[in-house]
Amino acid sequence: MQGLRAPPDDLSVLERQEACLLNWQQQGQEQSNYNPRGSGYCRQMQTSFQALPSGCGGEKNVNHGDVHGSIDCFSDGWPDLANIRYPVHGAANVEETSITNVSSNSSRKRKADKSPRSKQKENGGGGKGDSGCKRIKEETGGGATSETGQPNKKEAASGDASKKNDKPPKTDCIHVRARRGQATDSHSLAERVRRERISQRMKYLQDLVPGCSKITGKAGMLDEIINYVQSLQRQVEFLSMKLATASPLMDINIDSIFGREINPSCKSGSTAMIGMSSELLDQSYLRFDTLQHPHPCSGLDTFMDSSDLVLRPNVNPPVAVPDASFGSSFDVILRLNMSMGVLFGVQTCKACMAWISSKEEGQPSPSNHWKVKALILYQEHYDASDDNKRSGSVLPNNLKMEM
Amino acid sequence: MMACHFLRALFRIQQTSTSSSSSGRSRRIRRAAYASMAYSAGTRRAWSRALLRKLRSRARLRFPRRLSRAATPQRRDMDQAQVLRKLVPGGPSMDDCKLLEETADYIRCLTTQVRLMQTVMDSISS
């Protein structure tokens, strides 16, 4: 029972325990042939051991099995309980110290490994299993040393720890950890980094290309990507041909768009200018009427009319425009906006919202609904095209003109 | 940005080349489409840089029509990477990582361009 009370880091006690352990082990090896009761004793010892290392960290819970396993294997052949207890407890203490070392090592290692593991997400599971099996390996190594009975176990453990402490910074700067059995020279590490990056990009492309998520394997995915790019390029070609054939109509279209865009009067917000712009809107309405058949009567249209009733007094006094025409022109322009929704990016969307909110003081309640509708439309259109760089200077003006 | 550039180019094309043949016009329109893509992406991307270089040198934009060999199933990764290299502008000088990255960006821009052209087409035809 001396071993239980003695502090585990006392080297002389440990040495004595080692000597005893060696003796007992030899005895056990001699007597292992004709003693079937040893395993039963070992179970008892296990139950007592489970209470023993409770003072150590939570990491220990994982390691209990290993402790017991190692004890199991060398206490299997021991003859009687009274003789067993002393050396085995000593061994348990020694194991405890080594385990605390190991656990601290592993926690340190885990801290060091956090960044690479977060980087290589797909290897996370493998990395975990890797560290786990490394720990197991260390412990089995510890068990082996305790069995062979080396006197300076702590020094060995600390040396081990220093070795481990040397290792993580090295892997940290490379940001890649070799798994067990993998090569660790710089070439293969670089190759692994490259492959990982390629797989990341592939995943990104998989999200981008429709219908690519079901395909597994790099070759199939590359095939799909190639087909998609080709189809897009062909589509551009085809559309350009179509646009070339449909020239006379487009002339009007572009004329009207750019006629309004180039007009500098629309940039200012005074009422007279707005009146002019509303004249322009009417013009454009007439023009677009030839192109886009006027929408008969949608909910949007009625809302436009009702908002027009509110809008007209403060925006449109100089030009006497009939209600219906203004409303429908608004409708047309809104539909133009819808159809051109893809043309404008997120910034424009934001500018549009800002503009709408700035206009909101003039348009109390119906504009809210309108705003919501426009918002929904814009959200529909802008989901995919958010990453393109847009200049915020030209398009808001354009939008203002279009409104 | 892309839309403005493209529409302006269309306008210019319509104004200047009303007398030319439709194939020439379609080539010009396609060129304008790629130019607007490249301008909107800026010089940040390798593919847009390559496109801009091509456009500035006034070379004819030549894109592979149809790669019938690419469809055969026994092609390996590297061959497909070569095919992709040919498809993406500026591809031959990239390594694999860069190629995939640029391909992703290029696909995004192409989809936007296609949708833009389709909307313009719709607004014309309807």
Image (tube, coloured by chain):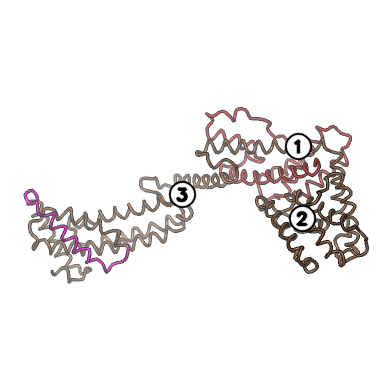
Chain colours: A brown, B red
**In the foreground, A231 or A391:** A231
The residue beneath circle 1 is B59
Q: Is residue A56 magenta?
A: yes
Q: Amino acid at mark 1?
A: Ala
Q: Residue, x 76% and y 63% (percent of image)?
A: A366
Disc 1 and disc 2: Cα gap in Å? 49 Å
Report the quarter where the C terminus of chain A lies. Answer: bottom right
Residue B74 picture location, percent across and down: 52, 29
Which span of residues is magenta-colored? A31-58
Are dots 1 and 2 in contact, CB under 8 Å?
no
Q: What is the number of the mark on residue A122?
A: 3
Q: Are marks 1 and 2 on the same chain?
A: no
Q: Earlier in the sequence, mark 2 or mark 3?
A: 3
Q: Main secondary structure of the magenta part?
A: helix
Task: Tell me residue A280's x, y (percent).
Answer: 89, 55
Q: Name the amino acid, label 3.
A: Glu
Q: Residue A44 lies in what quarter of the image?
A: bottom left
Observer-nearest residue: A240 or A338?
Answer: A338
